[in-house]
Image (cartoon, rainbow, N blue to C red):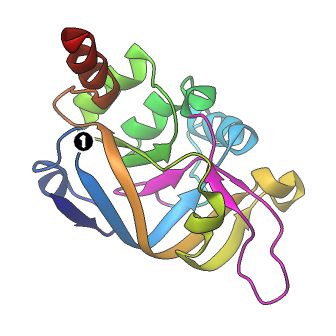
């Protein structure tokens, strides 16, 4: 089943999602990598507002490349989510409802997703050039000095990904391992 998501997300929108479901995102998503996450964590720890309201929003862990002439962005593939796991529970507590990346999430992040009713979505690693076609606008909204790690806002159409961790604690990677080890 394919589900359409558009931020701001609500718990009601996430209730029907299950590990393995295909997602198509339309609208706004934010981009943040390690350095931007560290700065957001510092702001949250000091009780200061973030450069965007995280309530109901999605963050994509993306490794962008410079655009060619006439492009909005170059290749826009996912980066490894585990690199920002230490910052993720605080962002989920602040209202973030979805993260997008590749790879596994820690037990702490998975528990925080269940607690705060949030999901983790996987974009296809190695498909950055294809994913970039879904990005129709890109704007740096904070920390431009970080270059590719600046906090950015993207407008996307037909951005496809898959639910890895749902609000019920299910994990697509664990389900896959269990399925294939049972048939071996």
Please tell me which residue lies in front, 142 or 106. Answer: 106
Which quadrant of the figure has residue 25? bottom left
Give the left or right position of residue 108, taking residue 59 as reference. left
**Residue 46 position within the rendered picture, expressed as x and y whole percent measured from the top left:** 62, 35
Q: Residue furthest right?
A: 145
**Residue 51 position within the rendered picture, expressed as x and y whole percent measured from the top left:** 62, 59
**On screen, 45 above or below 4?**
above
Mark 1: give few (<14), some (14-19) or many (20+) Cα within 10 Å.
many
**Residue 50 position within the rendered picture, expressed as x and y whole percent measured from the top left:** 58, 52
Please tell me which residue lies in front, 30 or 18. Answer: 18
Residue located 89% across and 56% down the image: 145
Residue located 34% across and 57% down the image: 56
**On screen, 57 above or below 105?**
below
**Where are the magenta residues, as a range?**
53-80
Q: Quadrant of the C terminus?
A: top left
Q: Residue furthest bottom?
A: 70
Majority SS type along the magenta span: loop
The residue that disc 1 covers is: 20
Q: Is residue 136 visible?
A: yes
| Magenta stretch holds residue 89 | no
Q: Is residue 96 visible?
A: no
Residue located 74% across and 83% down the image: 71
Q: Quadrant of the N terminus?
A: bottom left
**On screen, 151 above or below 78?**
below
Which quadrant of the figure has residue 132? bottom right
Circle 1 — which element?
A: loop
**On screen, 159 above or below 89?**
below
**Residue 62 position within the rendered picture, expressed as x and y whole percent measured from the top left:** 64, 51
Please tell me which residue lies in front, 170 or 29. Answer: 170
| Numbered label tally | 1
Residue located 39% across and 38% down the image: 92
């Amino acid at each position: 089943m394919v589900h359409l998501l558009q931020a701001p997300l609500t718990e009601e929108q996430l209730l029907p999602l299950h590990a393995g479901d295909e997602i198509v995102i339309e609208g706004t998503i934010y981009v943040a990598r390690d350095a931007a996450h560290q700065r957001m964590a510092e702001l949250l720890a000091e009780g200061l507002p973030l450069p965007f309201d995280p309530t109901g929003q999605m963050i994509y862990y993306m490794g962008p490349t410079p655009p060619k002439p006439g492009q909005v962005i170059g290749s826009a593939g996912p980066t490894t989510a585990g690199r920002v796991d230490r910052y993720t529970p605080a962002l989920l507590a602040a209202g973030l409802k979805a993260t997008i990346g590749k790879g596994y999430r820690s037990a702490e992040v998975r528990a925080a997703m269940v607690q705060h009713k949030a999901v983790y979505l996987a974009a296809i690693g190695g498909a950055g050039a294809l994913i970039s076609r879904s990005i129709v606008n890109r704007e740096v909204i904070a920390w431009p000095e970080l270059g590719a790690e600046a906090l950015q806002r993207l407008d996307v159409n037909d951005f496809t990904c898959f639910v890895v961790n749902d609000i019920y604690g299910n994990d697509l990677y664990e389900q896959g391992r269990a399925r294939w080890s049972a048939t071996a």
